[in-house]
Amino acid sequence: MDEQDAGTTRTAVLPSHPGWEEVRAVRAELLELAERVADDEVRDRLRAASRRLAAAGATPPGRAHRPRLSPRELDVLAQVALGCTNAEAAARLGLLPETVKSYLRSAMRKLDSHTRTAAVTTARHQGLLP
């Protein structure tokens, strides 16, 4: 099941549900592990599992317009949601801080948000992040 399929078959779950903090933490851990794994297949599977977790609370199609964010934009937003700085997110994702800043800026533009916090909040309300 790809990222699109996972997001379209589940109903939205309120971001304030107590279990979602654990889902966020597990997703971040999967992303961090993915960057440490040398095996390409295992790395891809860890990233895919992470995307499936992110899509678990997605709004079904037709309920609301959701901007399309790239997997890396979602990865960066997930790290920001955990309170990471650009440098911390870059280290966890195996990117340069400038690259993280670029992905974050792009996601913020797509989400029509002017701050990091607003982008995370909007992404959660849109069902893009758990």
Image (tube, rainbow, N blue to C red):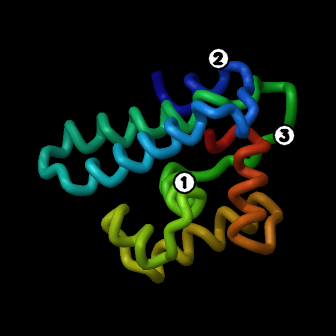
Q: Please state which of the two labelled residues, at mark 3 or mark 1, is closer to the viewer.
A: 1
Q: Can you tell which mark lies on residue 65?
A: 3
Q: Secondary structure at mark 1?
A: helix
Instruction: Give the x, y percent position of residue 121.
Output: 75, 54
Instruction: Give the x, y percent position of residue 26.
Output: 42, 40
Instruction: Give the x, y percent position of residue 24.
Output: 52, 43
The three-letter code of the residue at mark 3 reads: His
Q: Please state which of the two labelled residues, at mark 1 or mark 2, is closer to the viewer.
A: 1
Quadrant where the C terminus sits is top right
Between the residue at mark 3 and the residue at mark 2, the CA separation in whole angstroms equals: 16 Å
Q: Is residue 115 left or right of residue 18?
A: right
Between the residue at mark 3 and the residue at mark 1, the CA separation in whole angstroms equals: 20 Å
Q: Residues within 10 Å of mark 1 (few under 14, many from 20)?
A: many
Q: Is residue 66 left or right of residue 102?
A: right
Q: Residues within 10 Å of mark 3 (few under 14, many from 20)?
A: few
Give the residue number, with chain letter if any, for mark 1: 78
The three-letter code of the residue at mark 1 reads: Ala
Residue 102, above or below 63: below
Q: Secondary structure at mark 3?
A: loop
Q: Are marks 1 and 2 in contact (CB under 8 Å)?
A: no
What residue is at 72 percent from the left and 38 percent from the top? Answer: 16
Q: Can you tell which mark lies on residue 9?
A: 2
Please report whichever mark, 3 or 1, sits nearer to the chain's N-terminal start.
Answer: 3
Q: Is residue 85 left or right of residue 64?
A: left
Instruction: Give the x, y percent position of residue 76.
Output: 52, 61
